[in-house]
Amino acid sequence: MQRVLSVSLSHVIRSAAFLLLPFSFLALIAWATAGSASGSTTDPIRGAVWIWLGAHHIPFQLELPPTGIAGYLTYLPIGGVVLPFIAIRSAFNRAIDRLQGDFHDINGVRIIFAALYALLVTALSFLSKSDAITPQWYLAPLIAFLIALVATLTAGVRVALSRPVRIAARIWALILGASLTMVTILIFINFSQVKDITTTLQPGFFGGLLLLFLNVLYLPNAAVALASYFAGTGLAVGAGTLVSPLWYQLGQIPALPLLGILPTGKQPYALFGILLFIGLGVLLARWSLVYGIQALIQSYIFTVVGAILIGYLASGSL
């Protein structure tokens, strides 16, 4: 047990350092080029931790100067979760190799590893708070534990998913895959608008690379938003906005180049996209009914749960 704890802790720290070191480099360059007279040497360190926490989808409470108006940052890139997921999975694989079978149950090792990782994320969330930016550290244990646990389940002796879960995952893979393809096409079609927004920001060469990387991480969010648009529910971008096939009200929106693909008005014909979701429902039924009505009900439930989870991760305040 003691060996499992020590090996797990060392590899948890290694998985965090794997991302914190490059994030620290980026934050240091941003701090050095910002030219702030009131900045301190702790700013790039905190900035690196905040980027790392944002990759875990941990929200932030904001009171940014000079106005000091309270805000809430929860609109975080789904693609960012991939970074800690890969780091955790790689570190857990190395931990299992290091243990060389010196454990009774691999699931116990997974829980210990995930718990230690959640403890580290929670500690850094609490210690990195400032007057202007405060990570919601009390949410860190649950979020970090779930990410770490799911990542470890894909490493070592993998856990076999039930048939209804696999069917629901296929349905969502089709939805997100088709949406990502459509988002890519829309970026090329509306490339001039995307370019204009980027030019307005004037990010420079290094800032342009970071902006490109940020937009890539937000592509899954855009795919979910596109799917909701063609499903007829629409989406909101910024305060007082609503973009759907039948309603169009666009106020102030964030200066994110990816938003250049937004439609410029009502598009009633987009409601034909509902037929695609009906077709996916038929496909889910065909795949599930082969194994009985119970498999159909379970597949439907997992698909709905997936919709709630993905919708939550893809939305938020900015």
Image (spheres, helix red, strand yellow):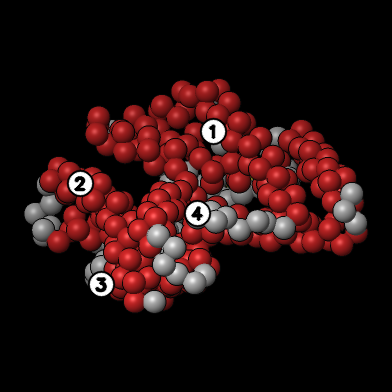
Q: Position of residue 99 (x, y in %)?
A: 38, 62
Which mark is first along the chain, 4 or 2? 2
The residue closer to the viewer here, 302 or 257, is 302
Which mark is first along the chain, 4 or 3? 3
Which mark is first along the chain, 3 or 2? 2
- The residue that appears at 13% across and 46% down in the rendered structure is 32
- The residue that appears at 55% across and 56% down in the rendered structure is 157
The residue closer to the viewer here, 92 or 182, is 92
Real-space CA distance between mark 3 and mark 4, rounded to the nearest whole angstrom: 30 Å
Q: Position of residue 211 (x, y in %)?
A: 35, 38
Name which residue type carries label 2. Phe
Residue 155: assigned label: 4
Residue 127: assigned label: 3
- The reply to whether discs 2 and 4 touch (Cβ–Cβ < 8 Å) is no
The residue closer to the viewer here, 140 or 131, is 140
Q: Is residue 150 visible?
A: yes
- The reply to whether discs 1 and 4 touch (Cβ–Cβ < 8 Å) is no
Which mark is first along the chain, 1 or 3? 3
